[in-house]
Amino acid sequence: MAKRAAIVGTGQTHHRSIRRDVNGQELINEAVTRALADAELTIDDIDGVVIGNMDHFEGINYVDCWSIDGSGGYLKPTIKLTTGGTTGATVAIAGYHLVASGMFEKLLVIGWEKNSESDTTGAIITCSDPVIDRVVFAGAVAGLALEAQAYMHRYGATPKDAARVSVRDRRHACNNPYAHLRQEITVEEVLNSPILSDPLRLHDMCPRTDGACAVIYASEDVAEKITPKPAWVLATANRHMYSDFTDVLDVSSLHSMVGASRELWQKLNIREPLKEVDVIELYQPYSWAGIIWIEDMGLCPKGEGPRLLWDGVTDMGGELPINPSGGVIATNPIGATGLIRCAETVLQIQGKAEARQVPDVKLGVATGFGGCFWTDMIAFGSKKPN
Amino acid sequence: MGDFWSDAEAIIHESCIKVPYSWQAGETASYFLTQLRDEGKIWGKKCPCCKKVLVPPRKSCPFCFVATDQWTEVSDEGVVESFTVVRRDTIIQPKKAPFAYALIRLDGADTGLVHVLGEVEPEAVREGMRVKAVLADDRKGSLLDIAHFKPVGS
Amino acid sequence: MDRVAIVGIGQTKHAACRKEVSYAELVYEAVTLALKDAGIGISEIDNIVTTSNDFWDGRTISCMATGDVSGGYDKNISCVEGDGTFGAFYGLTRILSGSYGTTLVTAYSKGSESVSSLITNAAFDPIYMRCLGLDMVSACALQARRYLSRYGISEEDCALVSVKNHGNALDNPNAQLGMKLTVKDVMNSRMIASPLKLYDISPISDGACAIVLAREDRARKITDKPVWVKGVSFCADAYLLGDRDLSECRALEKAAGAAYKMAGIRNLKKEIDLAEIYDAFSYQELLWTEGLGFCEKGEGGKLIADGATAKDGDIPVNPSGGLLGAHPVIAAGLIRIAEAALQIRGDAGAMQIKKDVRNALAHGVNGVCGQSHCVWILGQN
Ligand SMILES: [Zn+2]
């Protein structure tokens, strides 16, 4: 019989641009140790391990096998998933299915990356098809710049609107002791930062970070014994709908977000997400996503994203706070990034988010973005689902 | 294979992915490697739980999931537990074939170390053979600061 | 627990080089065959799990290439990195979780496009091991020596595996290396890394495999020959070669024990009729048969010498020819599941063993020297 499943413990490293004092296995170990401590469990309680990262950022093949020294997976089932930037959300969704299947009772899920160890762009351009795309069009910044240009052209938004998103997330990050970039910036500073790919400037983009995140899933049989406030998985949905960047024609919308969010709201029986969701941790690798993608998610009609931002609706204290943690603009250990979105949402539901706590969170949504404009989504709730 | 294919030319797109890496060894492996480089010493780390001396040293014990806490110097001599004589060349092997790899248990260590053997005819390598580390002249903070292991007494 | 069955199977012809197709097209070939085998269209596939490996493909986010050819457009989809048996495991749990009624699982490799020693060298720790230049072959040679010496198993015993599996591959229309060999041929083949000789080592192939898993109610509608998933488990051992006794396979013993328990298997010899296992090297078939409990420790050589694992033996192992017959790396374990399922259906053609196959075992491996194993028990009912 299928089981209900919840996250009952979370742990993350203090994210930094470079962690010279630890190797990858040791970085993983830090997050795992903290997650176990949070759930007051030991490694002996854990039935299995799910791990994810992006191979070419560290150049290690068979990471599921290599990571055993740090993950505690010795003589346990260990499985690896990888889907690019969505990896952290992908492992979170996998953790849910593995526990919900009834085959695992307490499962450890890990996302990690040591981005300082390689040339991030050098590695990421190899995601494009080697014969066609890679020769003409590749790299994370270029594709996102195209999306921003198309959106500006179609809806009349400006780089100043996007800058407001960076300002929000960098301000939020100051409340998060684990965040990588913890200094406020102003709209002017964003608009005057070095240009990368028109219209994107340095402070529109996420950093690259060394960091790891671990969460512990538990089945309904034990979740409430482990913590008084499990964060129950209510629904998951994802779309990885394109294979080549040149497949994506209308780039003023994130089609995968449109598809995944419609499915998620339907599963949750939600009609007005802006009113019904209490907090969102959005995998937002660049500022414009904080406008374009929340429209695609259905928080407001297309073209009205900037208004939501300037009205403070998505700020702390607003109607629907987005990225209380400071989000990806502040912290981005890529393979961990999606899982950090989940862990932060869980902290909100558990009431353990301290200075970044949104009051009375009953329903939170975490997202992942990556690959070829892909989206993964997962909804957590304080109430055990029926 | 369609009919069309029989007339089409097979294009092979030659490429290579090149990503530079700078792997951070971390404090534990850094101590091990600098001691090997500067002092020519081989250190293990002991697990407080299973009491195994792990060589190469790990910050936490892979078997017990607890932090290792005691640096322990081990011998530069040990026993060949298994070996293979490689007869084919690859671009990554540090020596030209034929040469032998061995899984070596150093005296004082509870885990095995893989390395290459030298100063020995491949045909003469045996399990149970005692071997000793030979340091490289030019040491850079890598496991290859041990040039190879040679039979004891040779 | 809900029951899940394999209701569709497809695999490509495996070859040293399939230069007329890209690896995405290779996957499409296998998916098309699996859907045809199931007699369903892609619209009846609820969700997809692809299996791939960025190193073998020379591509970050390698699963980007195989989503649309697996029918993943506008559907829920994920990707496991590792052997296809692990991908199939995740696909199974996505049904058991109550989320989906059917899962399409795909796996592929195009070994011809890169250099296997470089790719497998990347599995060694960059700080402690990689500079030594080990690859899968030289590391497994260390394991082979340790295993053979500990139990007094001869290189001729290993050669018997090569003779059997290359011979069985002659009956497999998809295999790459069907050969009639003698023990002498194997013993006289070129030494690569002692004690491993050329014919002890599986080739690296181009090929893909796809299966369709379905919940019982859906399975009954799709086929009258469902192959039931009765037990499955996986487990990983310690990482560094020196942390393990390479002549043992504790992770496999654990995975197999859990899979047998789930399947309610009490008497292996009576209840398991056939096994498709991960013979990347000839010695591995012997070592894994021990880990699976087909014989006592150290008796793997005797098991094959007695003919027990031959096609007409008590417990036929790899009637398809195994990995020695064809080895598209990441797909290798999923192909074991496919071949075991075909035997249960009685659809294995010239490979079909004589006795009725009620239960069959399939096995996949991740990592170096069998660090991580996945074991499946499939059955008629
Ligand atoms: Zn220990």
Image: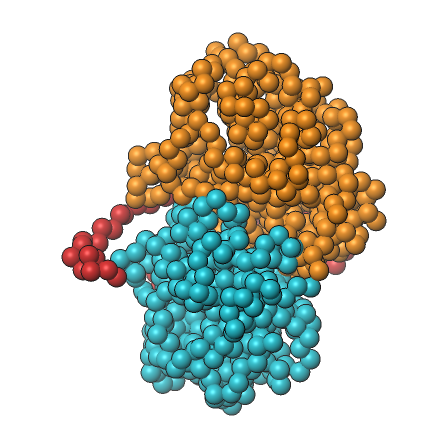
Q: Position of residue C166 (x, y in %)?
A: 38, 78
Instruction: Please state which of residues B107 and C247 is positioned toward the viewer in this rendering.
Output: C247
Instruction: Give the position of the N terminus of chain C as an image quadrant.
Output: bottom right
Which residue corresponds to the image point at 80% horizontal and 52% vertical from the top-left?
A: A222
| Quarter of the rendering containing residue A312 | top right
Residue B112 visible in this rendered orientation of the protein: no
What number of labels is visible? Answer: 0
Nearest the viewer among C305 and B120 is C305
Left or right of C177? Residue B63 is right
At which x and y percent is residue C317? 50, 79
Residue A254 visible in the snapshot: yes
Which colour style is shown? by chain
Q: Residue at 53%, 57% (x, y): give it.
A: C103
User: Chain B rendered in what hue?
Assistant: red
Give whichever of A330, A232 is nearer the camera.
Answer: A232
Image quarter (top left, top right, bottom left or bottom right) of the C terminus of chain C: bottom right
In depth, the one of C371 and C270 nearer the eye is: C270
Q: Is residue A241 above or below residue A19?
A: below
User: Residue at 59% across / 31% down in the picture?
Assistant: A282
Residue at image location 41% in from the left, 72% down from the top: C324
- As drawn, the chain in orange is A
Against A202, residue C190 (above or below) is below
